[in-house]
Amino acid sequence: MNERRLKAMGVQLGKRLAAARKLSNLTQREAAARLGKPASFVTESETGRRRVLVVELVEFSRLYRRPLAFFVEPFTAPGAAER
């Protein structure tokens, strides 16, 4: 998988993380505090500036009470519209 595709997937994942957080009625600071992380962790995860590890995705999933599939299925090709 090339870097461009990985970056696009990271951005899409970030959008889903932000959506799940908002559906959970949490601010970035509140989510970070509950995860025991700095606020920049949530911000950079949501913007795609940092890659989210699987173990971190599981933590987000539990915090936001969303299944892992909410965050990862299916990813669209760069330039394609989100479902």
Image (cartoon, helix red, strand yellow):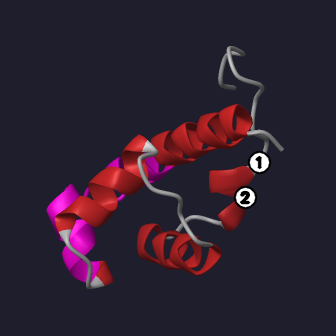
Q: Is residue 73 magenta?
A: no
Picture residue at 53% right of the left edge, 64% below the top: 52
Picture coordinates of residue 9 (x, y %)?
A: 65, 41
Farthest residue, direction front: 3
Callout 2, which amino acid?
Ala
State the predominant SS element of the stretch in magenta.
helix
Res. 65 mark: none
- Residue 83's place in the image compared with 53, above or below, is above
In the picture, measured across the screen, residue 6 lies left or right of residue 39, that is right
Q: Is residue 33 magenta?
A: yes
Res. 69 mark: 2
Farthest residue, direction bottom: 36
Quarter holding the N terminus?
top right
In the picture, measured across the screen, residue 51 lies left or right of residue 78, that is left
- State the separation of the CA atoms marked 1 and 2: 5 Å
Q: Which residues are magenta?
A: 17-34
**Closest to the observer: 70 or 59?**
59
Q: Are marks 1 and 2 in contact (CB under 8 Å)?
A: yes
- Residue 57's place in the image compared with 7, above or below, is below
Picture residue at 53% right of the left edge, 58% below the top: 51
Picture residue at 46% right of the left edge, 52% below the top: 17
Q: Secondary structure at mark 2?
A: helix
Callout 1, which amino acid?
Glu
Farthest residue, direction right: 1
Picture coordinates of residue 5 (x, y %)?
A: 72, 35
Residue at mark 1: 73
**Residue 12: which quarter of the image?**
top right
Q: Secondary structure at mark 1?
A: loop
**Closest to the observer: 81 or 3?**
3
Check disc 1: other Cα within 10 Å, few if <14, some if 14-19, many if 20+.
few
Check disc 2: other Cα within 10 Å, few if <14, some if 14-19, many if 20+.
few
**Closest to the observer: 59 or 9?**
9
